[in-house]
Amino acid sequence: MNPADFALDPPRCVACPLRKCGNFLPVDDAVLAFIDDFRSETQMLPAGETLIREQSKAQRVFTLFSGWAFRYKTLSDGRRQILNFMLPGDFFGLQQQFTDGATYGVEALTEVAVCVFPAARLWDLYRAHPQLGYDVTWLSAREEQMLDENLLTTGRRSAIERVAVLLIHLFKRAQRVNLVDADNGFAFPLTQQHVADALGLSLVHTNRTLRRLQQLGLHELADGRMVLRNAKALKQLADYVDHPLNAVPLI
């Protein structure tokens, strides 16, 4: 769906293009009607816009409908750690409901469209549709699993392994939402600074490592587009466990 069309006339959940891509778990009409009613609004935000501000008291949770975003934490001197990147279908904002303020920020990496839900109605979700409540719990557990993997990456993998695992992980996630074309290419809006902030590397080291992987013929990056030339070799280099793309919940 064109972002402008989404802004003017957001689709009902039953007609959501994400649900039609075949990589999200199906739900019955009653659950779809509840999610439709649960959604309070939709928003379009430009690249660089803040969706969640660190330490804010926001009382909303979100599903990313289109575009890319990222979660991050900053230190007082401005240094930033990107915790993870978010692609269409990702549900976020839940963690801030259990603290006095948001423990992380979320920024739009590209222009994004989001579905917005009031956090105050989460209890209604759990009471009315326990399976949907389980889906929320599953999504939170998957988020924890990805953070565990990120900790392993920054703590134990070498620079070239870190970059390799990030590239293959984003490639697999883009595949889930049909963003990868026939030649293994996909839009890659990350700058080298984003990669450095996600992997705990210096900008110089990031640049050198990306060039090294490209020289090895494993990927090609130009004009905001990434093509994986040898995904199998990248997986081996990253010691990446390649799970099948099973369907996942979509709120």
Image (cartoon, rainbow, N blue to C red):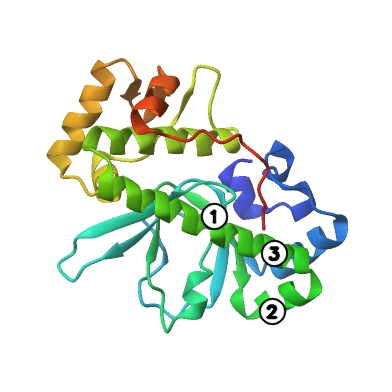
Q: Residue at x 46, y 47 (%)?
A: 68
> Which class describes the residues within 10 Å of circle 3: few (<14), some (14-19), or many (20+)?
some
What type is the residue that disc 1 sits on? Arg
The answer to whether any part of residue 192 appears in the image is yes
What type is the residue that disc 2 sits on? Trp
The Cα–Cα distance between marks 1 and 2, rounded to whole angstroms, is 21 Å
What type is the residue that disc 3 sits on? Tyr
Q: Viewer-proximal residue, 38 or 212?
A: 212
Q: Residue at x 69, y 42 (%)?
A: 17
Task: Decide which of tag 2 and tag 3 comes sooner along the chain.
Answer: 2
Residue at mark 1: 142
The answer to whether any part of residue 91 appears in the image is no
Relative height, residue 146 to residue 60 (above, below) = above
Task: Decide which of tag 1 and tag 2 comes sooner along the chain.
Answer: 2
> Which class describes the residues within 10 Å of circle 1: few (<14), some (14-19), or many (20+)?
few
Residue at mark 3: 134
The Cα–Cα distance between marks 2 and 3, rounded to whole angstroms, is 12 Å
Relative height, residue 109 to residue 183 (above, below) = below
Residue at mark 2: 123
Q: Secondary structure at mark 2?
A: helix
Residue 205 relative to residue 33: left or right = left
| Residue 126 image offset from top left, x and y in percent | 72, 73
- The residue lying furthest to the right in this view is 29
